[in-house]
Amino acid sequence: MKTLTVALPGREYDILIERGLLAQTGQRVRAVLPKAAKLAVVTDSNVEPLYGKHVLDSLTAAGFEAELFPIPAGEESKNPSQLARLWEGFMNFGLTRTDGVVALGGGVVGDLAGFAAATVLRGVALVQIPTTLLAQVDSSVGGKVAVDLKAGKNLAGAFYQPKLVLMDPDVLNTLNLPRFMDGMAEVIKYGCIWDAEFFDFLTARLSRESLMADIEHILYTSCDIKCKVVIEDELDTGLRMILNFGHTLGHAYELTGHYVEWSHGEAVAAGMCAAAKLGVSLGTTPPELPGRLEDALASLGLPTLIHCTAEEYAAAIGLDKKGAGSDITLILLDQMGHAVPHKMPKARLMRLLNSFNQVP
Ligand code: NAD
């Protein structure tokens, strides 16, 4: 078992990583919630038939009264009406302040159930059981929970840390290949922004089989990097912005594909490549770095270039809630394994994007 302790003062919790861990859900949750009687297990329509009963049985064996609260799978469910439906469902179930919510699923379930846990009864205990690679290495770590609004993604939310995160790498075996590689884009990102050795480790294993052979190490290292960043900057006012490497331009690609053509991981992969090339143009990134990154991502079947119109870039840059005023802070790499924020006028970024043929 690999254990990572997230040392946030007063809200310390563990991330446990082990194959087959799902079978131990009950006893692991009991250890952190000794007084809880009821657990509301939020899941989605794909995950419920795969793992719902297994988790429920384990929780029941540990003495909990547990009930499943399934939502339809997909980003469309991460909305205020599903949130309200969960609140009402929790109350009908008789959840009290000493009980808890378990998020069993990908990032959609984690964000929605997490926000429901943060707000119902002014906050009840939350346990995250992430079941996608993206959720394991990214969304379940760091405490951001949210729903989407008509005006945009993640616009209503909170910072709310779980009591425990349980990661069973075996659940990744039921993910389809594109979903698995989606998560790999974020894993590669951690190597880029923080740990060149980890990047090299990954590039020596660019198939699903070889990555799965070392998946516990990959999950541990990814979460460790994210935790280090989050502990220093829990409320996202400084260092945490390096986690956005590839995301500002990735946002433009998600917009251009109306969130359908390109998945988040695909958009981030192309966004990282664009940011690496921008970094070279700006004299920050070593010239050989974009090629290394493109080779790694292409071997995983991830896109390294997505075309986008000038208007779409402008919309993404203007809408990006991380950009302040008329300046934008892009995350660049000054070497493999190290990221630096680079503030520049949005107009200059647009000229650069136009100049290197990203805009058709
Ligand atoms: P998702 O939750 O929609 O899951 C993707 C698909 O995989 C869904 O159809 C789901 O039903 C299915 N699935 C989940 N686990 C499975 C399994 N083990 N086997 C088979 N199918 C499975 O999407 P995601 O990619 O996990 O997460 C994306 C969401 O995460 C977005 O809403 C994004 O905003 C959010 N996110 C949040 C943070 C954060 O810090 N809170 C960070 C990154 C992303």
Image: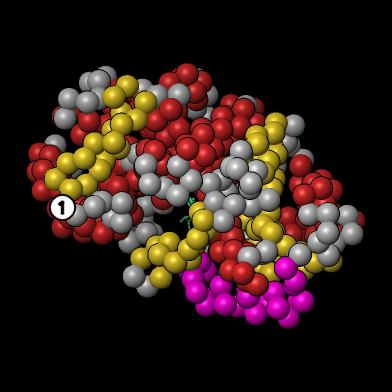
Judge whether residue 282 is colored magenta.
no
Q: Position of residue 181 (x, y in %)?
A: 49, 40
Q: Position of residue 315 (x, y in %)?
A: 21, 59
Compared to residue 311, the image places residue 360 above or below, namely above
Compared to residue 86, the image places residue 334 above or below, namely above
Residue at 77% x, 49% y is 32
Residue at 25% x, 25% y is 285
Q: Secondary structure at mark 1?
A: loop
Q: Position of residue 290 (x, y in %)?
A: 28, 27
Instruction: Place residue 12 in its image quadrant.
Output: top right
Region of the chain picked out in magenta, as a range: 75-97
Q: Position of residue 284 (x, y in %)?
A: 22, 26
Residue on which disc 1 sits: 326
Residue at 76% x, 76% y is 93
Quadrant location of ligand 1? bottom right
Instruction: Place residue 316 in its image quadrant.
Output: bottom left
The 10 Å Cα crowd at callout 1, few under 14, some 14 to 19, many 20 or more, is few
Judge whether residue 95 is colored magenta.
yes
In the rendered image, is residue 165 in sight? no
Q: Main secondary structure of the magenta part?
A: helix
Q: What scheme was used to colour the molecule?
A: secondary structure
In the rendered image, is residue 43 in sight? yes
Seen from the viewer's position, the closer of residues 167 and 357 is 167
Residue at 58% x, 26% y is 210
Which residue is at the far front?
Answer: 10
Q: As shown in the figure, which amino acid type bears the numbered disc 1? A: Ser
Left-right relation of 185 to 41 = left
